[in-house]
Image (cartoon, helix red, strand yellow):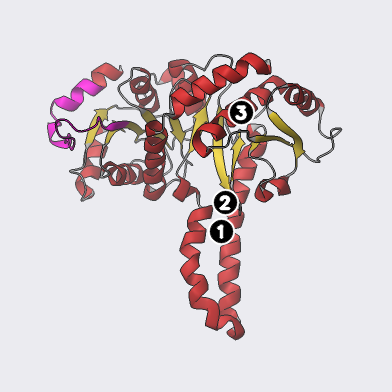
Amino acid sequence: MADDALAETTGSRDHIVQTSATSGSPQPVRIVVDVMGGDYAPTEIVEGAMQASCAAGVHVLLVGDPDRVDEELKRVSSWRACVSVVPVQSAIEMDEKPIQAFRSKPDASIAVAMSLLAQGKADALVTAGNTGATVTAACLILGRLEGIKRPAITIVIPTPERQVVLLDAGANVSTTAQQFLQFALLGSAFAKCSLGICEPRVGLLNVGSEITKGGTTLLEAQGLLAESHLNFIGNVEGNDIAAGKADVIVCDGYVGNVVLKHTEAWSHAVLAMLRNRMSKNPLLWPGYPFVMMAMPHLRNDLSSAYYGGAALLGVKGLCIKCRGNSRAKGINNAIAAAVRYHRAGLMPQLTESLSTTMKTAGA
């Protein structure tokens, strides 16, 4: 299905396809984007993708309804950037049940996009669509890495001293002890490859730091992690995340998604409270302009739009999952992150690192 769709991009819509790379220049990084996924699709998705495609050495494949994509491309002034359109007629909506929708819509935009990645016609995939459908498509079309039962959404949380890797942030509502160990392996390998941390400290998110805390699954996971070769430092609590106590924090997708959204919402609330407090107190007015100068930088540090999306680790392909409410800025930055990961060789390094650690971790 992906072959037929991609072939159509060289037909009646040749005016959309531009080539920015010249002979002898490096091969552009090909990013396939699910244009129909997300709360603001396709408008914000196309705009963000076009912004990203203006970067040198980047080619974007837009998978979506050709008429709607054409309409958005005409609206965006930078349409001459390096882009191709892969026409599809169906999409999986945000409120659809993933497995049933995936089976009933085999030619949906996320399925076609994932097929292009699996066939090597794209180097990475970006989507803001239905999380369950994305995970299902990745598992069925790309396949899972050896030894991994379930993939995990992996986010990078900024702290005052360092960045912290947290997974799972929403791919799995429930998790077994063995899967906690696999998440730790994935997160540790990711921290080594993307953050350059030689021996990442791994913590298990729990209600207390004592080894007796947690239910049966968490207690079993503690044992598996302690017996592994990983640099496991034990249980960590919610307040330890911002303190940077661990480099990698593992949890189930239910807890991780709550942490993600709470952290993001609370950071915006703190900035708003600071702005309001300073504007109402005359004694603070002299310093107000300087604080406002720092605000954009602090907002970027705390914003998911700045960091873009989250890597879906554990599948045989580079997939970036954005928040469903992502706007153009978030899509742009997610594509930029995918390009960085690809150029840094994240997937080969991750696979090699995971293969090595699997041999001694008992996963």
In the figure, is residue 263 to the left or right of 305?
Answer: right
Q: Is mark 2 on a helix, strand or loop?
A: helix
- The residue where tag 3 is placed is 172
Q: Does the magenta stretch include residue 11?
A: yes
Q: What element carries label 3?
A: loop
- The residue where tag 1 is placed is 268
Residue sticking out furthest to the front: 198
Residue 127, can we see it?
yes
Q: Where residue 54 appears, x then y in whole percent?
A: 25, 45
Residue 133, can we see it?
no
Closer to us: 112 or 160: 160
Binning the other alpha carbons within 10 Å of mark 1 as few (below 14), some (14 to 19) or many (20 upward) gives: few
Q: What element carries label 1?
A: helix
- The residue where tag 2 is placed is 264
Range drawn in magenta: 6-30
- When asked about the image quadrant of residue 168, the answer is top right
Binning the other alpha carbons within 10 Å of mark 3 as few (below 14), some (14 to 19) or many (20 upward) gives: many
In the figure, is residue 227 to the left or right of 339?
Answer: right
In the rendered image, the quadrant that contains the N terminus is top left
Binning the other alpha carbons within 10 Å of mark 2 as few (below 14), some (14 to 19) or many (20 upward) gives: some
Residue sticking out furthest to the bottom: 282
Q: Is residue 91 magenta?
A: no
The residue shown at (44%, 18%) is 142
- The answer to whether the residues at label 2 and label 1 have Cβ atoms under 8 Å apart is yes
Give the amino acid at mark 2.
Glu
Is 303 drawn above or below residue 224 in the view shown?
below
Whole-angstrom CA distance, mark 2 to mark 1, is 7 Å
